Amino acid sequence: MALTLSGLMLYAMWLVLGVMGLSFVVELFKSFSTGTFSSSTITNYLRDLLYFVFPLFLLSNMMPLDHTDYIIKIAYYIGVLGVLYNYVGGYFKK
């Protein structure tokens, strides 16, 4: 299987990975500055990569199965919006 991220899908994935990376760096800095660093900080983000990013890659690899070229793209963008809501919404809830 070849990765078929192209156009807006690629930018959406960069946005997801950027928000996740920024959140990781902020949480890592907070944990180091307060002295409460634990390995769960890292494993939580690895789990999020597996639960959030991997399904997006699976959806992008299923694009050749969709002959309308819209159904899987819509599911992909809804997934991207869900991940962004999860991370950005977490900052406003704190």
Image (cartoon, grey):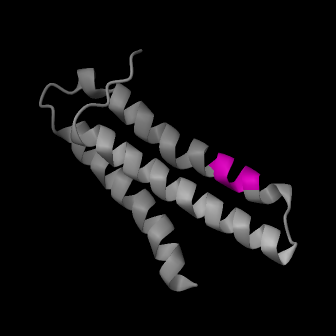
Name the residue at 25% across, 21% down: 64
**Which quadrant would the C terminus be assigned to in this image?**
bottom right
Relative to 62, residue 79 above or below: below
44 in magenta: yes
**Of residues 76 and 32, the one drawn nearer to the viewer in this rendering:** 32
Residue 68 sits above or below residue 93 on the image: above
Q: Give the farthest residue toward the left.
A: 68
Q: Would you place residue 2 above or below residue 24 in this image?
A: above
Query: Please, is residue 27 above or below residue 55 in the view?
Result: below
The residue lying at 58 percent from left, 45 percent from top is 49
Of residue 30 and residue 9, the one placed in the foreground of this image is: 30
Read off the magenta span: 42-47
In the rendered image, residue 52, in percent from the top left (x then y), is placed at 51, 48
> Horizontal and vertical percent for residue 66?
21, 27
Is 46 inside the magenta-drawn segment?
A: yes
Residue occupying image coordinates x 53% and y 56%:
20
Q: Residue at position x 36%, y 35% from top?
A: 59
Horizontal side of residue 4 vs 32, given as left or right: left
In terms of image quadrants, where is residue 35? bottom right
Which residue of the protein is positioned furthest toward the top in this rendering?
1
Residue 31 position within the rendered picture, expressed as x and y whole percent measured from the top left: 78, 70
Residue 85 at x, y percent in the picture: 41, 67
